[in-house]
Every structure is written in C-alpha cells, then in structure tokens.
Amino acid sequence: MKRVLIVDDHAENLYFLEALLGSQGLEVVSARDGVQALELARKDPPDLVVSDILMPVMDGYTLCRELKADPRLCHIPFVFYTATYTDPRDRQLGYELGAEAFLTKPSEPEDFLAALMPLLTRDETRPAPAASCPITPPESTMTRYSEALVRRLEDKMTELEEANRKLKEEVAERERVEQALLASAEQLRQAQKMEALGQLAGGIAHDFNNQLTTITGYGELLLSRPEVTSSPAARQEVTEIMRAALRASALTRRILVFSRRQTWQPVVISLNQIVRGMRDLLDRTLGAHIAIECRLDPDLEPVEIDVHQFEQVLTNLALNARDAMPEGGTLTLSTRMVTLDAQFCRDRPGFQPGPAVLLEVADTGLGMDPEVLERLGEPFFTTKPPGQGTGLGLTTVLNTIRQAQGHLQAQSRPGSGSTFQLFLPVADGHAEALDSSETAPELPRGTETLLVVEDDPILCDLMVRMLESLGYSTRTAGTGEAALAILADATCPLDFLMTDLVMPGRLQGWELARKARGLRPGIPVLCTSGHQHRPSADQDSSSQGFEFLEKPFTRRDLAEKVREMLDRKSSSAPPEPLSPPDSGACAPPRRGPLP
C-alpha cells in the first residue's frame, strides 16, 4: 500500500486530504509543519509528499529543499498544494527546488487526484534519472526564495494592516452602538419620568379644572344678577374673582401642555396675525422699559397650529426675555420663510426638505452659558430665584411646538442676548382670519329637557343653574348607572345628554354615551372633562358623533355648544322612544330660569 505524507497547519485541510486519499486505498500520514514532516520522512520514507507552503516553524519551500538534498529521500515525489503562493514566480521557484507538481487550492478532487496518481507510479514505469538526485539549488534559486519570502511578508503585513483597520472600524462601530444604546436607555428613563410627571400633572389639572369651572360659572351667574350689575363695587369684586380664576385656568393649561394632555385644536393661520394680535398685550405685560420690534414677512406662508396654545408660547418666550433684561432692552419678533435642506430634516422627523416658516424671538439680555442651554426645556428647571419661576415655561413651549410638528432651537452667549428659533412646516390651505369683534352676542336659549350627569354635587348644581338660567329643564344623575336608569325609562322625556367622562362606578362617560345612543337613538351627547381626555381607539369608534367640552368652560361656551347640537338634531325627525318597563327613575324635571 502506497504511503502519502500530507503537510498542512490547518486541521480542516488535513481532514479533507486524509478522506480523499484514503478513499483511493492509500495510507495517509499527516504533519502540521515542515520540521514534523521531515522527522516522519526520515523515520519512514513515504511514497509521496503533499505540502502546503506557508506554515509555522518550517515552511514548504524549506521542507522541499531539505528532502531533495537528502540522498535517501530525494527520489520521493514532492507536490506543493497552496492557496497563498500563487504568483508565477512562486511556481517557478517550487520547480527549481525539485518539486514535481505545483497545485493551487482549492482544486476539484478529480483534478487533484489526476495530478497525484501518476507520481505514485512513476518509479514503476519511468524511474527518475540518478544524476538528478540529490538536488542542490543554485544561488539564484536561493535569491528567488528570499524574494518570495519578502513578498509573502509584505503581503502578510498588508493583510494584517487591513485586518487591523477593519478591527478598529468594528471597535468604533461597537462603541457608537453602545453609546447609542446608553443614550436610548437615558431617553427611555427620561420618557418614563415625563410620563409619570405627566400623569400626576394631568390628574391635578383635572381636579383643579372642576373647581375652576365652579368658580368661573358662579362668577358669571353673579355678574348677570341685577343687584351686582347695579353696584360698581360689587361688580368690580366679582370681576377680580373671575380674573383670578382665568389666570389659574391659564396655569392649568400650561400644566396640561407639559403633560401632553391638552386638547390640540389647530387652525390654518398666518403667524403674522398672531404676532400683530398680541402686540398690545405684550406691550402692557413687558413694561415700558422693554421695546418691542416686529419684522414680519408680508409673503409668509400659513401654518397649522392651536392659536391659544401658540399665544401662550409667545407669552412664555416674551416673559423670559423680559426677565433676562432687568435694565431694559429690545425684544424682536421676526417672521420669514426659510428653505430646509436634507441634513436639517434628517435630524428632525416631521420635516421635509423645502420651504418652512421661521419665527425668531430675540432679546438683548444677559444671555445663557452652554450649561444652561443644555438644560432648556427640562421640567421644573429654572434660573430664577425661588418663588419667581415654575420651570414649566419652556417645557410648555417645547411640547406645543412638537405638537405642531415643529422644531425649537436656541442660540445664546453670556452678555450677547438670546435668540429662539421656531421652525414650523407650511400648512395646506388658506389662513383663517382671527375674530376681532368686541361685542358679544346674546346667549342662545332653549326650552328642551337635558340630563346632566356629574358626580361632583357643587359642579352639578352649577351646570343645572347655568342651563336653567337659559330656559332649559334639567334632570340630574351622580353616576353612570343612575343616568342609564333614567335613559331606559321611556316615560322620561329627554332631549339632550351631558355627561362627565370620569365618574365613580364601572360605567364611565364614553360607555354611558354609547349605551344612551342604543336606548335613545339620535339623542345629542355632550361629554365634559377637566382632564382633556382623548378616547382610545375602541372608545373613539363608539363615540363618533359625540361632542366634547373642556373644563373649565364659561356659560357662553355651554350655551352655544348645547344650542348648536340641539339645532343640528332638529333638522331630522325625532326617533320613536323605546318602551321598557317603568323603572321608577323618572322624576319631574327642574324648570328654569331660577328666581
């Protein structure tokens, strides 16, 4: 049986050759480097040597030279099998060292065997000439051997440099990913903190709005009484109560914007209209030591925003500017069109490259250092002394701008003033005109019967008084279940349902509204809440056609909304009432107006 010595430093190559040659009935002996192979060959000469070139300890060229220089081993056929030395000069060097064949990895098994098998039978059919053995390579061959080694060393250095470059890139990418993960984790923690604060703020605002509705409602009722209107002093006192309640209402709106629970009511409008409309108010608010300059682009495109919330944005920025100019200065409000590039839009989701509206609010005040700039918009962060700032002003501004799909950025240096830039996308459609009428029309009235569902007895009594002062009749319920019993009683005439959204018991406002429509198809339903509640997807599908009125609301808000919904209903024929068993829930309605 013929013996073949295979030399390779890769285990997978040895395994392949052992399996291939073994399948041909050959005995296979393997070595991992040239030194081990030379030792095995001298101990028990093989019939054929198949060797890699690039190996540790002793390479294939040196192994071939050692074997061909040994009189006992020089007749053994030697085959180079390499994937590294593929240059024609490498092949020529191999033949000069005495190799019988030079094969390149990978080779097809058939081609590999076709090159090897004739060498195993060469001594039987065509003995090698004696003069060719042993072989002593000439000096020129050794020079080419050295050159081949240098080439391989240079190639290896290039490979190592490329591998090192890729490794550095992978390390840098890994560090970038780790930094991004850390930033994402920090953003998640911040979002969770904001969500918790938002839920707390929203709950406080809900309860506070209920109380404000009571204060403003009774204030309006007092202002409508002859004994108050006839007394300037009494009217002034009630008016001051109303003004305080309205200021408190503005504070709750800021809290709700911060908690992102403020209902967004956008309209298409020009920022120039808002700035002009607030000019007089800002003059009175900021004081005579602050000069206001307006530089408005007459060709400004419209934007889609909530006017009341954006007025609050301007007010907050103007008040911050005033506080930054204690010795006086200039506040500049300017609008213009800008063109956004792809890089700007890539970093700011919601924008598309192209035209956008820019509002700049600039002051000549004290300015801010980088540490303060970095914390702008952080809830409850303020540089003002205790008791002079809530830390919610810029948070409110940021949330409002985000709701408008806009972007806010600030530029400032200590001693050089500050500039706030508000970028807003251009809206489709034409700008609406702000209502400038100062004479309020008479409140609309009616004679229909309304069911008022409210768990707060003081607030319930207020709404009843408001409605009855407008001529309506009312029935009341403190829970959803009690209201449902009245709705199910066909003997109770009802023209309208007004319900709070958050009530004790399992039956909440949206579900009561849905059930009411099932019992009395077509009945107008007005939902109220101090939470600026937005229904979920399933609630929204069941609340189609329902109206929503935010607390605190005024007597005019309530009068106009109720009349509007009733008039809309009157255009269609009233449905036939259902006839369930008498539940005994119906009581005679209260009839207004009150004495």
Image (cartoon, rainbow, N blue to C red):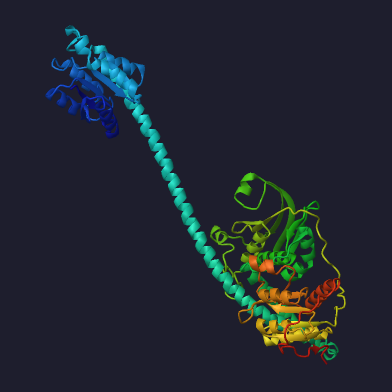
Against 484, residue 352 (above or below) is above
Against 517, residue 420 (above or below) is above
**576 sits to left or right of 263:** right
Residue 43 sits in quarter: top left
> Can residue 136 be seen at all in this image of the molecule?
no
> Can residue 494 be seen at all in this image of the molecule?
yes
Quadrant where the image shows the C terminus: bottom right
User: 116 or 159, which lies in front?
Assistant: 116
> How far across and how far down the image is residue 101, in percent?
29, 17
> How far across and how far down the image is residue 442, in percent?
87, 78
Residue 161 sits in quarter: top left
> How far across and how far down the image is residue 182, in percent?
46, 56
Residue drawn 59% across the image and 59% down it? 414
Quadrant where the image shows the N terminus: top left
Residue drawn 29% across the image and 30% down it? 16
> How far across and how far down the image is residue 306, in percent?
73, 64
Residue drawn 47% across the image and 54% down it? 181
Q: How many marks on residues?
A: 0
Residue drawn 26% across the image and 27% down it? 23
**158 sits to left or right of 574:** left
Residue 264 sits in quarter: bottom right
Against 328, residue 509 (above or below) is below
User: 32 or 377, which lies in front?
Assistant: 32
User: 500 or 383, which lies in front?
Assistant: 500
User: 316 or 353, which lies in front?
Assistant: 353
